[in-house]
Image (cartoon, grey):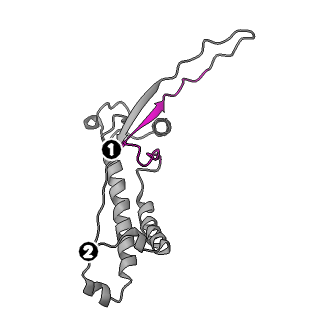
Amino acid sequence: MLTARAQISAEVNNFYNRALLERAVPLFVHTRWGQVRDIPTKSGTDTIKFRKYGALTAQTTALSEGVTPTGKQLSITDVTAVVLYYGDFVTFTDKVLLETIDPLLTETAEVLGEQAGDSIDKICRAVLEAGTTVQYAATATATNEVTAAMKLTRSEVKQGVRTLQG
């Protein structure tokens, strides 16, 4: 018979959740700027749609008194994501749990937290690598055109930052 959530006190559950997160969060390198949205429970879907609004070009022409400017139109791109589930667990024999002198459950929660952080980061990195927004050095238009003579410039870094912020 399995132990149910109702049989474990909230204090114990909170302790292990904290232990998991403390080891997982520092490993999130590729998720820092991602959007997080909840899909309501029992909503009947595992899909969420994000809306991306395109940046407007800088307005460098002064306004004239009494003249209404033409205005701009927003560009909107929908991005759809589907929830996928990942997980793992560690098995112990009853003898290990009874005889070990280490705080085995705490250590295991921390190790699983580290694994979760590493897993999430690698999955997010793979999604980013598969993306189509790419910036190459100098005059290169493909990875195989980048040479050792091409140096990353300050303006290219600024352009990359603007791209990421957009």
- Eye-nearest disc, 2 or 1: 2
Residue 51 shown left or right of residue 148 in the figure? right
Q: Return the residue nearer the eye: 160 or 6.
A: 6
Magenta-drawn stretch contains 39:
yes
Image quadrant assignment for residue 101: bottom left
Q: For numbered disc 1, what is the local secondary structure?
A: helix
Count of picture labels: 2
Residue 39: image quadrant is top left
Which is the main secondary structure of the residues drawn in magenta?
Answer: loop
Q: Is residue 2 left or right of residue 165?
A: left
In front here: 52 or 151? Answer: 52
Marks 2 and 1 in Cβ contact (< 8 Å): no
Q: Position of residue 114 (x, y in %)?
A: 37, 66
Q: Which residue is mark 2?
A: 91
Residue 158 x %, y %: 50, 38
In the image, residue 65 above or below residue 11? above
Residue at the spot 74% in from the left edge and 9% down from the top edge: 66
The circle drawn on residue 1 is none
Q: Secondary structure at mark 2?
A: loop
Residue at 46 percent of width and 50 percent of height? 32
Q: Which residue is mark 1?
A: 127
Mark 2 or mark 1: name the one nearer the start of the chain.
2
The amino acid type, in three-letter code, at marker 2 is Thr
Q: Is residue 53 left or right of residue 1?
A: right
Amino acid type of disc 1? Val
Q: Is residue 33 left or right of residue 137?
A: right
Q: Residues within 10 Å of mark 2 (few under 14, many from 20)?
A: few
Q: Which residues are magenta?
A: 33-59
Separation of marks 2 and 1 at Cα, in angstroms: 31 Å
